[in-house]
Image (tube, helix red, strand yellow):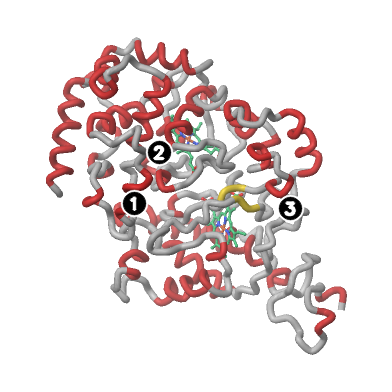
Amino acid sequence: MTRTQRSFSGRAAALAGRAAALLLLSAAPAALTRAADSSALPLGIPQDLYQFVIPKDNPETPEKIALGKQLFFDTRLSADGTVACSTCHDREKGFVDRFPTSKGIHAQFGKRNAPTVLNAMFQQTFFLDGRAPSLEEQAKLPIVNPIEMGNKDGAAVTAKVAAIPEYVSAFNAVFHQPVSYDNIGRAIAAFERTLVFGDSPFDRFMAGDANAMNESEKRGWSLFNGKGRCMSCHGFSSTQPFFTDNRFHNIGIAAHKANFVELAVKARHMVETGNIKQIDELAIQTDLSELGRFLVTKNYADIGAFKTSGLRNIALTAPYMHDGSLPTLWDVIDHYNKGGIQNPFLDGGMQRLGLSESEIDDLVAFLGSLTSSQFKAEGDAEMQRQKELAATKRPERDTDAAMGRKGDLGDVAPDPDVKDPALIGRTATEK
Ligand code: HEC
Ligand code: HEC
């Protein structure tokens, strides 16, 4: 433990003492909270990037982090006192809820799957359609979303929090201001910026320990970069080690159930550009959710496009994709192997991959090597559970499509027949 971590825990404990009635600091294990200085960063997370993403106008301080942590775990932030941020971003589940789509107040289900907040600080935009520009702005929205935490507006939650004496003194101490909606967002964001997780077998492998990954995981890493084409969107480098290009792509999730054009025409008239509160409600509560990035930009090319997910600790966060429609990592690879689901807005990077069953297993094994050491036990158990489930059911698997033997995707099938160039890019059935 570094000196900063020690003094941080000390100061956090002092604040906890003052706010003893809240009893909420105990809800998140102390080991999860990192020092607010970069010397304590885990293996694989670059210090300069960490420093870069801490905003100048919201510096990390131990008191602010402790306050944000209390708020994050406090159900009193919801209209009926039943839902906290941690209800859907549960520490015990890798900061997700493991539902296909999330459940807010009065057991109402939204339209989207909860992403993890682990390493969320390193993203360039927030939410699956990127509608929030910062963690500060992100945190304010679920609080006032009618079916998530259900407060009428920012003033309503401010009044609730300001009625709790412990919070009044904590806000005063941290911000030298009374409780406000903006400062609730700031404190929560400061806490989220402590959720920095690296130190996976993959990180140890990249740091030079050739034995940190097994042979299957290593083969998976080469497939990820090569035949699997994953790297073209889930980019990785030692300076940007989060496996995302921070861009938006239509990879054909939910393409079978959404009539994109009809939805887009409807949305174009309805959405007020720049009104993120309105977009938040449309995304969480209506079928327009499937339009993804289009709701934010109204750009035709963004129809059905979602932010490329980061892949660290991915074993912990099933089910997958923005609608939680893929239960296991095997289903995810089956989806990519057949080139996704055809629709007019499918990203050109989606191509049939021709992966064999053992290559699919290797890619999944590689994804399993991205689990941080703190979550090793949960990660192993989750990989095992998914493996058993995938052994009974592989609804997305379509080997003929994956191998280019059927399907009209208009792409170049794996191993095209070079004897007749005129047939390359056409489907086998047309031959
Ligand atoms: C009812 C469940 C629920 C509650 C409560 C909730 N969230 Fe979320 N959270 C979600 C869902 C679902 C999404 C994705 C929504 C979307 O992209 O449209 C999300 C997205 C996020 C993201 C963006 C992650 C990314 O990859 O872009 C962050 C950060 C986050 N939530 C933090 C919070 C905080 C902080 C709170 C409390 C103030 C909170 N959430 C309350 C369900 C919930
Ligand atoms: C064309 C860009 C693109 C390519 C290529 C691509 N992905 Fe993705 N990936 C995305 C996007 C965008 C999402 C989020 C889609 C959504 O939620 O609808 C995603 C989501 C995922 C998820 C689910 C994340 C979550 O938290 O739900 C996993 C796992 C994943 N990709 C792994 C892979 C692997 C492995 C490969 C290679 C076989 C790959 N991806 C290739 C863009 C891509």
Q: Residue furthest bottom?
A: 419
Question: Residue 254 location, x and y as percent?
Answer: 69, 48
- Residue drawn at 45 percent across, 67 percent down: 366
Q: Which label sits on residue 90?
A: 2
Which of 367 and 119 lies nearest the eye of the viewer? 119
- Residue drawn at 82 percent across, 73 percent down: 426
- Residue drawn at 81 percent across, 39 percent down: 262
Q: Tell me which amino acid carries mark 2.
A: Asp
The mark closer to the camera, 3 or 2, is 3
- The CA span between labels 1 and 2 is 15 Å
Q: Is residue 4 left or right of residue 275?
A: left
Mark with earlier residue (1, 2): 2
Q: Is residue 324 left or right of residue 352?
A: left
Q: Is residue 4 above or below residue 213?
A: above
Q: Is residue 49 above or below residue 390?
A: above
Secondary element at image label 2: loop
Q: Is residue 352 above or below residue 24?
A: below
Mark with earlier residue (3, 2): 2
Q: Residue furthest front?
A: 56
Q: Is residue 414 above or below residue 245?
A: below
Q: Quadrant of residue 146?
A: top right
Mark with earlier residue (3, 1): 1
What residue would you read off at disc 3? Answer: 345
Q: Tell me which amino acid carries mark 3.
A: Phe
Q: Tell me which amino acid carries mark 1.
A: Phe
Check disc 1: other Cα within 10 Å, few if <14, some if 14-19, many if 20+: many
The mark closer to the camera, 3 or 1, is 3
What residue would you read off at disc 1? Answer: 197
- The CA span between labels 3 and 2 is 34 Å
Question: Residue 276 location, x and y as percent?
Answer: 58, 30
Check disc 2: other Cα within 10 Å, few if <14, some if 14-19, many if 20+: some
